Image (tube, rainbow, N blue to C red):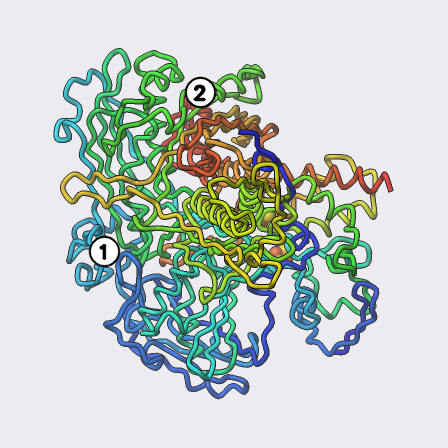
Amino acid sequence: MELKFKVNGQEIFLQVNPNDSLLYILRDRLHLTGTKNGCSAGHCGACVVIMNEEAVKSCLQKAKRLNNAEIITIEGLTPKEPSGELHPIQQAFIDATAIQCGFCTPGYIMELYGLFLRNPEASLDEIKVALEGHLCRCTGFKPILEAAVLAQQYLNKK
Amino acid sequence: MSLNIVGKSVPRADAREKVTGTALYIDDLRFPRTLYLKVLRAGIPHAKIKNIETKEAESIPGVLKILTGKTIGIDPEHFYGTCIFDQLPIAFNKVRHSGEIVAAVIAESEKTALAAVEKIEVDYEELPFVLDPVDSIAEGAPLIHEKNGEYKHLPTFTPVPNSNIFFGYNLKKGNYDRVFDGADIYVEGEFEYPLVNHVAMEPHGAIAHWDLAGNLHLWSSTQAPFVVREVLAGYLNLTMNKINIHVPSGGLGGGFGGKSDYNIEPLVALCARFVPNYYLKFQLTREEVFIGTVLGRGLKGYMKIGAKKNGAFVGIECSQYYADGAYADTSCNVVLAGGHNCTGPYFFPNCNLKSFGVYTNTVPVGAMRGYGHPEGQFMVERLIENLALKLGIDSRKLRMKNFLKPGDTNSLNQPIFEHNGNVRECFQRVVDSLNETPLPGSNATHYYGRGFAALVKSPVQTANASSNVFLKVNEDLTVSISIGGVEMGQGALTVLAQLAAEKLQFSLDKIRINPEINTQITPWEWQTVASMTTMRVGNAILIACERAIEQFKVNASFHFQCDISQLNYNGKAINYKDKEFPLEKLVLGYQYPDGHTEGNPIQAVGSSVVRNVTLPDSRTGQYHPYEWTFGAQGCDVSIEKSTGIIKVLHFVTALDVGKVINPATAKGQIYGGVMMGLGHTLMEKIEYDTKGRMKTVNLRRYRIPKLSDMPEKFSCIFVETPQPDGPYGARPIAEHSAVAPPAAILNAIQNATGISFTKIPITSSVMVEALSRRK
Ligand code: FES
Ligand code: FES
């Protein structure tokens, strides 16, 4: 099928298989490798991106439902300049030492991006609910939760 | 010594790449002319291969090659390994676990390769199988390796021919054949620590390429590029200078031992030979990580301890059986470490400790965070809890009474010194930390309990393990350092840069540790395991820094025309009496005003070889591993009576870390290790169905902790008894917090409910059932 959608603000036309996952399209067709594949089955959250302003697991989204969708990936949050200013959520992950191997990190950042887009005043419980669908084997979660709270502060100060 | 950078929570060196998604992991690498490898796995646990039919699969357009044991061109008598050489890259005429690879397809796309895999037909003659290590050593158990005992192996490991035992270790200390002489009271138990998966969030992958000059280039998500090189050189009969093992610049998306030694690399390298000049990529799925890489733990054990009426330990006896899967190798070291570490940080005058590595028709066991320590120490800490109950003394006092102290000997008969660290202080601080919040009394809906355990760990490493670094100071006084250690999340790049900056008195932003590894140009490293990077690579860096400083002085001595002993270095200049000469003019040697040059550029090599590590004595089992790290852990738990849901309310870890180099990254290691230990205790277990196929093949069926499983309160305490030979006094810490959670949590459950569990995991349904049985 012919897929027309937007990724990080850019209009994209692609010939795809209707059952291809958004994760596959992003990583293997568009080479946007910032989005990670931890399970391909909706269990880990490493592949979370923003689709039409909602955080979604891209491994579960099929191409046939993507027409005209607007996607934002971690690359969309990333400054274009090498030393450019990071997105406040990215900065919060650094400041809270919420990264170890970093494989889960883009998924968490996009989840929080989606959450704060909808609900800038999200309560701690709402933050926890949003992060519950993500697995991190390295950090023990505590620094990630701290990063989320810090990110909210940074965003609301802006 | 006042420190400027060591001891500070500086931001991670790799943070910017990781938060922007630009860090490159194995699956992110892109190469021209890439082909894809997919494999057919046995699907049955033990069988002879009668025939493999590949014709239909071969006819699929886009399929380049289908390889099986018979067609891949291997000598079925030529095996690889590092401890026991018992492996082939692909099944030859037999499969020994259900995830074993029987055929490999090279195709233009992953989809095509998978379609071809589906069309391969294998005709098996099924054999009886065995999954349990105790069953596996029973009379009449199916023999998994007919050649057990004939394989090449290191002398330490002692296979028993015509059995499934590939290594039996027996450690004897003191009155070992009458360990309980003089004891008044005994406790004993049978224990189980299940098979578990590491679940690094990044699945394993490798990409192999043979250039037309016959060089092998292989990129892999490996913790052990130099071990991979060694194995490939031996197996493929290649000289090492033709092998380039690369680790991607983003490092690994987690390892935890599951990516150490070697794994899928021999198969990818071999298959890629059939398509020279292409790049052959083999990326595992999550399911394949479960069924086709390595697992950890898998212990069934029996332990008995005897004590005097006053609580003084007299002796310990233990038998451990490890379900080490279809191939032995790294698990040899698990068995060895498990054997002598099961005494925990306690003084037992008499020990008779046996441990057995046993072949089973399951996924091979490899290294796993802290291996050989959590297994046995789980047993001893549970028994100490029961001994205290039996003696009617406070278990905390019983532990304090029996902790190893300077002058005591551990199970290996090694004397313990003051500098080994202070387990008493660790334990007391855990007690104090928990005491800050009173434990709620049990009520109509919940039980509450508090539990403790202590721990000790030594790195398990080959006796000649070393780390090496290349350091160069650039003309602008920045520093580039190459190491062979792998960044896999633990924070090596950050902590090592801190050490270099401190030593050279440079600001941290001047130091760059090269994150990329290529065995052709990176200095040799044994492998990144055993929590040894800060210690071993760190020491190598300090040595290289000292040599660089020395070279600066040599260069400056031409300027000052003096002996180098009269010169001082301060990170900016070399001083002689009241004169100084800037470092940047000394980087390439010393150039006299007429242009001629003396001295040399500032480049240095640093090496750190572990010293005094010996091999086990064949009679007593005694040997010298490396140094020790002591610690203690404790927790408060609540148990909901109706559901059996166990919540950890507060978890405290205290480790004698010697010296904290970076508090934030050190804490990160502790949080992560505790959560892994908590997962093992409350939810994680690899399970097989009645046909010997793994059931827990995804992250829904194999559950690991989520955010909601995190303790409400999480405390880390660092005790700092300097390690004399550690960088700035630091000692290994990264795996340690995963050692004692099973015992601490089970002790807390016993404290809450009176139920003495000896097997993990205690899921809510296990808990509910135990509660109802008790009523
Ligand atoms: S890759 Fe999508 S949830 Fe794991
Ligand atoms: S940082 Fe490694 S999985 Fe989260």
Of residues A101 and B71, the one nearer the viewer is: A101
Q: Secondary structure at mark 1?
A: loop
State the image quarter where residue A97 is shown.
Answer: top right
State the image quarter where residue B769 is shown.
Answer: top left
Q: Which residue is mark 2?
A: B425
The answer to whether mark 2 and mark 1 are in CB contact below 8 A is no
Please, what is the three-letter code of the amino acid marked with disc 1?
Leu
**A110 with respect to B116 (left or right):** right
Q: How many marks?
A: 2
Mark 1 belongs to chain: B
Query: Ligand 2 closer than 8 Å to the CB at disc 1?
Result: no
Q: Which residue is mark 1?
A: B154
Residue, x 36% and y 27% (percent of image)? B382
Q: How far across and how far down the image is residue B555, in percent?
A: 52, 52
Relative to B475, residue B377 above or below: above
Residue, x 33% and y 36% (percent of image)? B376
| Mark 1 closeness class: few <14, some 14–19, many ≥20 residues within 10 Å | few
| Mark 2 closeness class: few <14, some 14–19, many ≥20 residues within 10 Å | some
The reply to whether label 2 and label 1 mark residues of one chain is yes
Can see residue A105? yes
Please, what is the three-letter code of the amino acid marked with disc 2?
Glu
